[in-house]
Amino acid sequence: MSTVNSSRASEGAGGPRADAPRPEPDPRRWWALTLLCGLQFMILLDMTIVNVALPRIQDSLGFSESGLAWVVNGYVLMAGGLLLLGGRLADFFGRRRLLLAGVVIFAISSAVCGAAVNQSMMVAGRFGQGIAEALAAPASLGMIALLFTDPKERTKALGIWGGLVALGGTLGYVISGLLTDLASWRWIFYINLPVALVVFLLLPRLVAESKMVRQKGETLDVAGAVTSTSGLVAIVYGLLQAAENPWGSASVVVPLLVGVALLLAMLIIERRAKNPLIPLNFFANRTRSVINVASLFYMAAFISYTFMLTLYEQHVLGYSPLKSGLAWLPLGFAIGAGIGLGTALTPKLGVKLVAALGFIGAGVGLFLTSMIDTDSAYLTGLLPGMIVFGLFAGATMPAATNAALHGVTVQDSGLASGVQTTMQQVGSALGLAVLVTLALRHAGDEMMNGVAPEVAVTAGYALAFRVGAGLMLFGGVLILALFERVSTELRDPTAEMLEKAAH
């Protein structure tokens, strides 16, 4: 989104025409990219590195399992809820300034998490890390537009940037296992500090400040961002409270009602805002709306799967954090293979069919995982479902990105990409709130009937996996039923944003 706005500013300020000679590239650009990639890798790593350490964090700080969900949800709610505002802030006040602010907030929040002595301190730190990502990520991407004006170099830079997603996600589990097993879970947060310090000291030497030229009367939609994020936090809080309280209790009903009221207020604000974060007519396109709804189901199932299977491995099967981290490696490889398969098949089979089959196949993988019991073997009980789930989930990604851009102009591709990312983060938070609550309630009912705790907990996880499988299958059916005809030509939203901004 930030790069789109910068392109508008360039045009409005009498910027160079598309056929004008490109300026000489900045000789420091590759060093700057290395630094930005290091920062992005650190941020991506922190999204997954916490998962393997969750049982140790739970034991150390006394979290309940519903409360433990906030260690993940605090991060994704802030990162997703404030992402679009972060892009606008970068445009208004300067990308380098916002990125450095994000680095400082990330370092402070990481130190708070590492030094946490109670639950509130940990959750507050994770909220801070999510806010930092919402500030830093759009600003980082906007800088690439200014650093790499040659299309071939930009493609190479984007390839390096995009490769960090899979690498950070896979290595997060392993690094978390190593640090938690050999040192302490606190070091998964402390390792961020030297990286943040290097970026803070070197970035001003490598990247010049840049920001958009604002039009008269152009303002930030802060009210829309605050009401949407606050509403989501309230709803997630209410859903998690339902794990330990009756549905009709005030501790559940009040936050749910407040959350709904805030989201309704956000819709009114967005309808009336002069420069809304998300223009409501963006959702008039049926295919874009369907894939964004399906993304909620996708991430709800995905994040809940990794969250609960990690707890199952360590609490029920007795895996060490290191063994648990290594156990996730096949998932990363399967997702990578699936992305390659989806990229190859989409031009041949079409976006609609590949996306739908990916959702349905991932649902089958979750159903296989739901067959677990208290003494499941890794090779026969966990690995088959993990490989099937990862392969089909990965295959869905290229087609889903294409669908999210259906009918979008280059000028609005940043908005489309930002909305998709936001929906994924929101889906992660809601999925944890609903499915973890479901698993805990079922386990509690089983124990009241005299079932052994480990058997009851395993049954709760298995039920949640089956519900996640149902969400995936439902998403696949929605795609088959409601998608319009989508071009099979794969499009890269980031490349389109940068191509526009470079001119």
Image: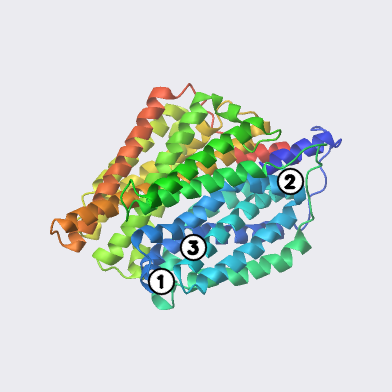
Point 58% across, 25% down: residue: 407
Secondary structure beneath dot 3 equals: helix
Tag 3 residue: 123
Residue 158 place in picture, x, y as percent: 62, 47
Quadrant housing the C terminus: top right
Marking on residue 91 = 2
Seen as rendered, the residue at the extreme bottom is 183
Marking on residue 61 = 1
Point 55% across, 52% down: residue: 78
Point 37% across, 37% down: residue: 359
Q: Earlier in the sequence, mark 1 or mark 3?
A: 1
Instruction: State whether residue 371 is above or below residue 49.
Output: above
Q: Is residue 417 visible?
A: yes
Residue 341 place in picture, x, y as percent: 42, 40
Residue 443 place in picture, x, y as percent: 23, 55
Nearer to me, 50 or 262: 262
Indicate left or right for 398 with 34 as reference. left
Amino acid type, residue under disc 3 in the picture: Val
Secondary structure beneath dot 2 equals: helix
Density class for disc 1 (Cα within 10 Å; few <14, some 14-19, many ≥20) is some
Which numbered mark, 1 or 2, is in the foreground of this view?
Answer: 1
**What is the distance, in whole Å, between disc 3 and disc 2 at their CAs?**
29 Å
Seen as rendered, the residue at the extreme front is 250
Q: Earlier in the sequence, mark 1 or mark 2?
A: 1
Find out whether the residues at labels 3 and 2 contact each other: C-beta distance under 8 Å: no
Amino acid type, residue under disc 2 in the picture: Asp
